[in-house]
Image (cartoon, coloured by chain):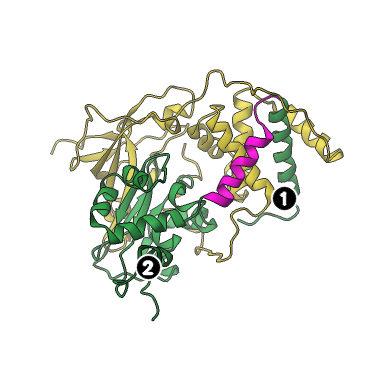
Chain colours: A yellow, B green
Amino acid sequence: MNGVHDMGGMHGFGPIVIDEDEHLFHAPWEARVRSMVMLSIAQGRFNADASRYGIEQMPPAVQLNAPYFERWLASLEFNHVREGNVSEVELEDRIDVLRENPSFTVEPKAPLRPSNPPRTGNLDGLVGLSANPRFAVGDAVIAKNINPLGHTRLPRYARGKRGTITRVHGIFAFADTNAHGLGLQPQTVYNVAFAGRELWGDSAEMNQVVSLDLWESHLEPPPAE
Amino acid sequence: MTADPEQEPYVALRTKALESLLIEKGLLTEEAKDRQVSAYEMDIGPLAGAKVVAKAWTDAEFRGRLLSDAGAAIAEMGLATGTSLVVVENTPDVHNMVVCTLCSCYPWMVLGLPPTWYKSFAYRSRAVIEPRSVLSEFGLELPEDVTVHVWDSSAEQRYMVLPQRPSGTEAMSEDELASLVSRDAMIGVAAVEEPAT
């Protein structure tokens, strides 16, 4: 989707702020959110592509104002609700219970409930070698001008631009479909290098190249000359 | 990007509420969750990447294997990479830097968790359109004839930069070399400095 998460080339976010003494986590809840996300993906509750989509679907102003791990939390809630594991009402009610009674605890269940079906993706070892890739190193390609409402890993700044294949990475699940339960659609992923001037015109800096990893479905051959 | 101090308790409450429901429903255990947290806090950090760099600087054959298949080369050192890792080499003509404009993909298997600036909107938006300007904010000024190659991590490949070995380090051991290599140099926003004598 053409969301605010797709930030490459945007202006106005100011200088890079570097905090030399920074801690990995700023509060205990951040570490807990991270571990819940990693475990949920490892258990096949949802896949990494759906996890990214969960952040993208946050309303733009909310997304821009939420600190990093709050965006992860929003996605974690979104995906567990989307998969029917919890409901929004249950979440609201449990927040109220914990607000009234901070020492409220629940009984853990063993064994854990399996994910049925498990939501698999590229972190589950799907990678293979491409038997018959459409493009080869050195080929010119155009990144398609697509504007899907759902998840895509083809950023806006490269759409319609011409680049060159520099690596053939092998076969991976297609994030754009797999984020939405529309199947793995495994296909070749390529590294494509774009010249700075192709992307940014006269605003490009001197001697600049940007490489992106794109799936075969994102690419087409340039028109015949 | 800093949390509103009034809001943070509510975020913590939301976290607890979800955690409590997932445990109650048999979707999560306390113990597994704690193990994940400690793995990231204690076990993984940029030292793994620095060791890889130092080995590449001292062993040309390893360097060749690292650049052609980083996962296999790093496995020789007893380190696992999980998803696919690609190592890109800085030369006198090409400087590489890594970003993820769409989210915050990062080579955590060799560098640990990303610094906050890497996840910031400023870095994500600017690295692809004005990388030299970003690098100069990190104190790195590159000559105009050096190509700046930005790797935007849009799929499951993760990128790490192999910095140039500084002069004046010919007599140093692998461990001493590793101690010179900063996380920022492996993201590509810094050079490895010649050690002060």
The answer to whether residue A21 is left or right of residue A159 is right
Q: Which residues are magenta?
A: B25-43
Q: CA distance from mark 2 to mark 1?
A: 38 Å
- Label 2 neighbourhood size at 10 Å, few (<14), some (14-19), many (20+)? some
Residue that mark 2 sits on: B192
Determine if marks 2 and 1 fall on one subunit.
yes
- Label 1 neighbourhood size at 10 Å, few (<14), some (14-19), many (20+)? some
Q: Which mark is residue B8?
A: 1
The amino acid at mark 2 is Val
Main SS of the magenta part reads: helix
- Viewer-proximal residue, A160 or A138? A138
Disc 1 element: helix
Residue plotted at (48% across, 29% down): A179
Residue B40: percent from the left, percent from the top? 56, 48
Does residue B144 sit above or below A135 in this rendering? below
- Viewer-proximal residue, A124 or B66? B66
Query: Which chain is home to disc 1?
Result: B
Residue B102: percent from the left, percent from the top? 45, 45
**Residue lying farthest left?**
A225
Residue A41: percent from the left, percent from the top? 54, 32
Residue plotted at (51% across, 25% down): A119
The amino acid at mark 1 is Glu
Q: Is residue A143 visible?
A: yes
Q: Tell us which disc is closer to us: 2 or 1.
A: 2
- Viewer-proximal residue, A136 or B50? B50
Sequence-wise, the earlier of marks 2 and 1 is: 1
The answer to whether residue B93 is left or right of residue A156 is left
Residue plotted at (59% across, 41% down): B36
Disc 2 element: loop
Residue A111: percent from the left, percent from the top? 65, 22
Quarter of the image for residue B155 reads top left
**Residue lying farthest top?**
A116
